[in-house]
Image: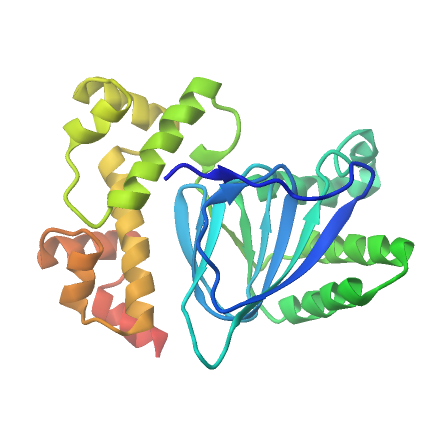
Amino acid sequence: MKPLYQKIEIHKERLFVIKNNKVPKFDGLFHFHPEFELTYIHQGSGRSFVGDRMVTFSRGDLFFLGPNLPHSWESTYSVRQPSQSLVIQLNSALWKGEWLEGEELSELKLLFKKSLRGLKFIGNNNFAIAEKMFQISKGSKPMQNVIDILSIFESLGRSQSYEYIASPAYLPGYRENDYVKINLIYNFVHLNFNREISLTEVASLVNMTNQGFCRYFKKITRRTFFVYLNEYRTGCACKLLSEGQFNITEVGFRSGFQSISNFNKQFKVVVGCSPREYIKQLG
């Protein structure tokens, strides 16, 4: 699945737009845009694909994504409760430049750099930030809105309660041809992870021999293709286990593992515990 370019309607002289999205469910459209994006999940839960990784989201989660980072939000449909998010999208052309070189803004500059891999913030601080975002959405004083946004970034820049989403290999900096090839592979895995995938099949996508593809993928991502595939499948398995609709055996097969023994083995390598222990930790 190739990410779609999404045009955000921000006047070239405006610093940001803010949106309050309330829908029956988030549609899961895989897309990208040149704006920074700060998303607070007010209602709903589901999964998000960001770059080459999948994470789950639920009420109270906060995400900060850098420019042109492919992502999607796919929530579980609920008759009783719609999905709702509050989103601030920043005009990246105006939030970059020489003014960020000032020593006083070093934390902001570092935060923007980190966002290129996507950040998921965790903890009670998210609710305070959400309050500011809601105030901005109601605000009619443009200058105060900008001050509030800077205040949010000041808080996020100091926070240690976050995790990276996309792998280091997904950072911008490939040659353009590398980006196209790797993205093609990631998208193929996104669509086909739940079935058996052969090395020959993947190598043919980028017109390489099996041996050449193995060397290329490891050089770009710093891990083998099958290590990446097992990480991806395990992430999907964690999502299914947290939903509680299927037993461990069903989750293993639905996530693309061809045997339960291999599922248990790979799950422990990636997560650090068995699927059964993982369920116990969920409570």
Of the pair 95 and 222, the residue shown nearer to us: 95
Q: Quadrant of residue 102?
A: top right
| Residue at 43 percent of width and 33 percent of height | 169
Indicate whether 16 appears above or below 197: below
Residue 97 is left or right of residue 124, and the answer is right
| Residue at 78 percent of width and 30 percent of height | 97
Of the pair 98 and 75, the residue shown nearer to us: 75
Quarter of the image that includes the C terminus: bottom left
Residue 56 is left or right of residue 209, and the answer is right
Quarter of the image that includes the N terminus: top left
Indicate whether 270 appears above or below 185: below
Q: Quadrant of residue 244?
A: bottom left
Of the pair 158 and 234, the residue shown nearer to us: 234
Residue 126: image x %, image y %? 63, 66
| Residue at 40 percent of width and 42 percent of height | 52
Residue 16 is left or right of residue 222, and the answer is right
Residue 112: image x %, image y %? 66, 41
Indicate whether 240 appears above or below 34: below
Q: What's the image's color scheme?
A: rainbow
Q: Is residue 214 visible?
A: no
| Residue at 70 percent of width and 65 percent of height | 129
Of the pair 218 and 9, the residue shown nearer to us: 9
Q: How many marks?
A: 0
Residue 135: image x %, image y %? 78, 67
Q: Is residue 71 visible?
A: yes
Residue 94 is left or right of residue 237, and the answer is right
Residue 155: image x %, image y %? 72, 58
